[in-house]
Image: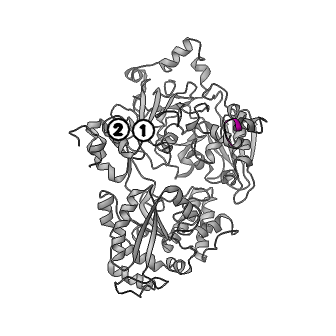
Amino acid sequence: MTQHPLTRRNLLRGGGGLLLLATAGGCSFFDTSPDTGAGAAQAAGSSAKEAPALAELVKAGKLPPLEQRLPKNPLVVTPLREPGRYGGTWNSAMVGEDDIDWLIYTLGYEPLVRLKPGTNGQKGPDDITPNVAEFEVKDDGREYVFRLREGLKWSDGQPCTADDLMFAFEDVTTYRDLHSTGIYDLFLENGTTELVKVEKVDERTVRYVYKEPKAGLLFQIATATFERPGASGLLLPKHYLKQFHKKYNPDVDKLAKDQQLEDWTQLFMLKNDVPHNADMPTLHPWKITTAIGSGTAVVAERNPYYWKVDQQGRQLPYIDRFRSELVSDVEVELLKIMNGEIDMQLRKFNSPENKPLVAQNAAKGKYRLYDVPSRLSNTMIIQFNQTIADDGLRELFRNKDLRIGLSYAINRKEIIDGVYAGQGEPWQAAPSKANALYDAEFAKQYAEYDVAKANEHLDKAGLTEKDGDGQRLGPDGKPLSITIMASTEFPHHVEALEFVKKGWEAVGVGLRVDPIAPTLFTERSMGNNPQASTFTCSDFDVITGTGGSHYYVPSNSGSARYAIRWAQWYGSKGKSGDEPPEQVREQLEAFTRMRNEPDFAKALEHAEEVVRIAKEQFYAIGISSFPNEYGIVSNSFKNVPDSMAAAIVNPGPTMPEQYSL
């Protein structure tokens, strides 16, 4: 394929106390920056303090001078390898309008505080650094003070002040009309429906005061973006959004009706949506000018009021324009990459099975691959519904010997070779080697392919009766066949289940694969309907919210598919769902202690208890470790690292504003 032009047809053939972090002005955000003297800037093509197009607008009187557009203490970013040139367009792609995460993680990563480049937040406060705001943590994590940069402005030139922080809290994130299903727990006292106390200290400063330590608050803020719920709503442009809010505009319902919407809340949510609303002021390096739904590509132009500079005081971003073309499917995205039409890309195309093809065409496409350690610990896990309504199946699925026996009946090497291009190793639903909670025994328990052990444990599970064809009889006296629901979001799961089916049938258990769309998958899961289901498995997060790390503990009723009713019991504090067995309750108690502990070392001790019980419970059968992810970057595209940390918001923490062409 490297010898001929690529076409779609050809491809389809183939801790405590006071923590004060001052402004980042003068700080280096990368450890690998070279000589940054004036000579380096000249070599990069310019020593100008702002982009030529902006300088022309200033000269024409259409834009204030640079010093009036920057805050008094702009955040200083040292480029990864070299000072950049002004100009150019970053060409990328989105697989349909739903591929919104690509915009979130490239354009929208500007939270109050951010992850340091090369980190993922899992080492506690040391991974967090100031961004839009400076911050203080007081009283063992009970008080958080956020101070906006003096002179900070929105992309339309309007001041960004503490009033925007208060508007976001009082009138949006905790405004009941906008949250009919409840308030995000970040803004609540632990385990209650009581709101945190938020006060305006001065024109640039607010403080959040909790009665008990709010461990993980900074992490949740640092991993939030303009489309993520909760933490991403801490700062919003009041001067723009108040015109669509009933508290400020008594005629807003009429305005909504004029746009054929049911009420003002629908209108407000549409306007408070950066990817779909090009009028929304932002603090991002590029402001969207052609939004989703307005053309064949999402386009964003440089923000003239962007508040970061390089170490020589040159306003960022270096690149003029961001463009993401909407394509129909991954195959089209792959073709564009291999034909050299994409400058930098990370999502959708980068599956394990595509990696050999992408790597083989790097020279032709004039790009290189960079590594991204995965935040996933498993390619596919099989979860049996231990709270299913059927009495017989519920008793069977809770029998650990059933899960052990069926795990031994899977030839994982066949799946790794046949589905995942030989990448990865047999692995259970356990933390990865890179995780602080890594347990080699947990990862490998019951993972070898052993038919004799499989039969032994299935017999122990009570499945000793068989029909004339050797198929084991289930609780209803009929041949046992388990239906596994798989989301079409993961086509490789359907492929892998064909190998699983062959192994299970060899030990007398049938398997039926039920591939369904993601929306229906979620609906059925929440309804406690499936017998079993598949999903990928995330790594274990010590710093997490109420429903985190749900593959290891039934904390989230939307994701703990092995025990939805137990998770509902936990989330409702016993008001709904089913009370779990004693050991599971002990695990949930340890999980609660972990997520409420501000001292990271102590939280880790509680996390070890959570994982120990997960190992003992063996909630899910895993297939293989998830290979490192990867992205591609054009040879002419500068300042992208060779490797990124395993962060959910990649490439945001690598600071795309310092990328250069």
Provide residue 542's location: percent of width, then percent of height.
Answer: 55, 58
* Residues packed near mark 1 inside 10 Å, few (<14), some (14 to 19) or many (20 plus): many
Label 2 element class: helix
- Name the residue tied to disc 1: 93
Type of secondary structure dominating the magenta stretch = loop
173 on left or right of 111: right
Bounds of the magenta span?
Answer: 257-261
Residue 19 placement (x, y as % from top left)? 63, 45
Q: Amino acid at mark 1?
A: Ala
Residue drawn at point x = 60 percent, y = 70 percent? 566
The residue furthest top is 60
As drawn, 403 above or below 603: below
From the top left corner, tell me how far across and down residue 444 is, in percent. 39, 69
405 relative to 261 in the view: left or right = left
Displayed quadrant of residue 41: top left
Foreground: 49 or 471?
Answer: 471
Mark 1 to mark 2: distance in Å?
9 Å
Q: Is residue 78 magenta?
A: no
Kindly identify which residue carries mark 2: 336
Residue type beneath disc 2: Lys
Residue 273: name its quadrant.
top right
Image mark for residue 292:
none
Tags 1 and 2 touching, CB below 8 Å = yes
For the image, the number of numbered tags is 2
Q: Quadrant of the N terminus?
A: top left
